[in-house]
Image (tube, grey):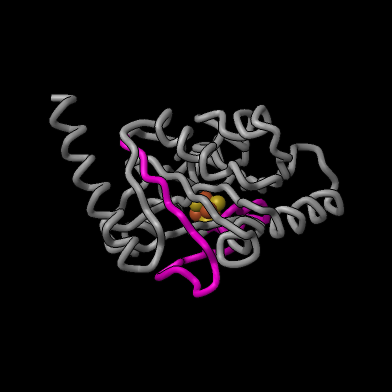
Amino acid sequence: MEKHRRTLNSKLLDNAAAALRRNNFEAEVYEDGKAAAAALLELAAGGKTIGVGGSMTVAALGLADALAAAGKTIITHKPGMDFETKRAVWLAAQAADIYLASPQAVTLDGKLIFIDGNGNRGAAVIYGPRKIVLIAGVNKIARDQEEGLWRSRNIAAIANNLRLEKDNPCVAAGRCVDCASKFRICNAVTLLWKKPSVSDIRVLLVNEDLGY
Ligand code: SF4
């Protein structure tokens, strides 16, 4: 059964990659996270500075550590940084050679969806870094924009609220209630319908569940 599920997922990812290419992104499918990580290291070979957006996918694959071990300077904010330090980090990441992040949803018609509390990742994936590399597991595939926004709010955001120990109403409700909480983590939607003209964006799709 697992074999058939993997085959089906592989088709889904192929379809999403083809749609992304039609929308002017570069896109490839990898059979597992290890293969995607190896591809990333090759892509990063010419870069010195790597901005990293908060991403459980990037963390699950140990990509920041692998890039640091390859001699890259990692630019990312850390818990406990004060606002001015974070702001400086976010601006430096915006100008990095490579920016690495993961969307909350990749649609089968080739759109990319991100929802952020602050918007630094959203800004970076539109314009700024020399190269933007986005990694997504098959669990991020959604039928269309509507389903992608639904999964971003009702799966990814709730899991992130739990991870960040934020007691927003969705945690108790088990669904997004479009809250008015001052600790809300869903403030800015970045929806890439097609690749912004001067940005260089490559999407690595992986045939395993990664992140939220
Ligand atoms: S309830 Fe609020 S914090 Fe939770 S997913 Fe919805 S908008 Fe985001």
145 displayed left or right of 5: right
Q: Residue at x 50, y 57 (%)?
A: 114
162 displayed left or right of 91: left
Q: Residue at x 62, y 51 (%)?
A: 98
Q: Whole-percent x and y of residue 57?
A: 49, 37
Identify the residue at the far bottom of this view: 197
Q: Who is closer to the viewer here, 5 or 97?
A: 97
Q: Which quadrant, please, contains the N terminus?
A: top left
Q: Whole-percent x and y of residue 10?
A: 22, 40
Q: Residue at x 61, y 56 (%)?
A: 121
Asked whether 209 falls inside the magenta stretch, the response is no
Q: Which residues are magenta?
A: 179-207
Query: In the rendered image of this protein, does residue 193 appear above or below residue 129?
Result: below
Query: In the rendered image of this protein, does residue 211 appear above or below residue 195?
Result: above
Asked whether 188 falls inside the magenta stretch, the response is yes
Q: Whole-percent x and y of residue 176?
A: 45, 52
130 displayed left or right of 108: right
The main secondary structure of the magenta stretch is: loop
Query: In the rendered image of this protein, does residue 179 appear above or below residue 77?
Result: below
